[in-house]
Amino acid sequence: MDQYVKEIQVRWSDFDPNLHATHWAYYQYGALSRVDFLKERGLTLEYMHKEGFGPVLFREESVFKREIRPGERIFVALFLKKAKRDFSRWTLEHPITKEDGTLAAVVTVDGAMIDRSKRKVIIPPPFVVEVFSQMPKSESFEWID
């Protein structure tokens, strides 16, 4: 199975006073992974702004498995978990693993692209479909109606 993985050095600011990584940090790790994937393929925020559309998330969820500690290196993968065939809606999954391979968390997001002026979900332009089609698919990937 193809993979897209970003290595991330956790920061002191990612932790609360009990040295637990905050829920917000996990969401940021997922966002870094997916934004870098899109950017590396030319689907930048500048491009989307110029074309009048952008991403919107309907749901963001983290399932925590093992603690991340200050100073650890983590690896954040990106998988397409579900999608409509026109990519007007999609679900992305970000397994977060520790350096020793232990699964620390799984971040899942449901989203779409919206027309920024009309504030409505759109069928994305062909270039977006091309980029999303390049995403590695999860083992449980499914097309949705």
Image: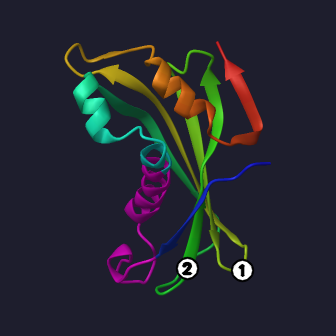
In this view, 78 is above or below 97: above
Per the rendering, the mark at residue 73 is: 2
Q: Nearer the viewer, residue 38 or 137?
A: 38
**Residue annotated with mark 1:** 100
Question: In front: 33, or 51?
Answer: 51
* Above or below, comparing residue 98 to residue 1 in the picture: below
In the image, the segment drawn in magenta is 10-36
> Is residue 19 inside the magenta stretch?
yes
Residue 103: where, in percent of width, then height?
A: 69, 67
Which residue sits at x=32%, y=77%?
13
In which quadrant of the rendered image does the C terminus lie? top right
Residue 64 seen by the camera: no
**Residue 142's x, y, as percent?**
73, 27
Amino acid bearing label 2: Arg
Name the quadrant containing residue 122.
top left
Q: Secondary structure at mark 2?
A: strand
Q: Secondary structure at mark 1?
A: loop
Relative to 25, is 110 on the left or the right?
right
Between 46 and 90, the residue placed more toward the observer is 46
User: Which amino acid type corresponds to the residue marked 1 in the rendered image?
Assistant: Asp
Crowding at label 1, few (<14), some or many (≥20) Cα neighbours within 10 Å?
few
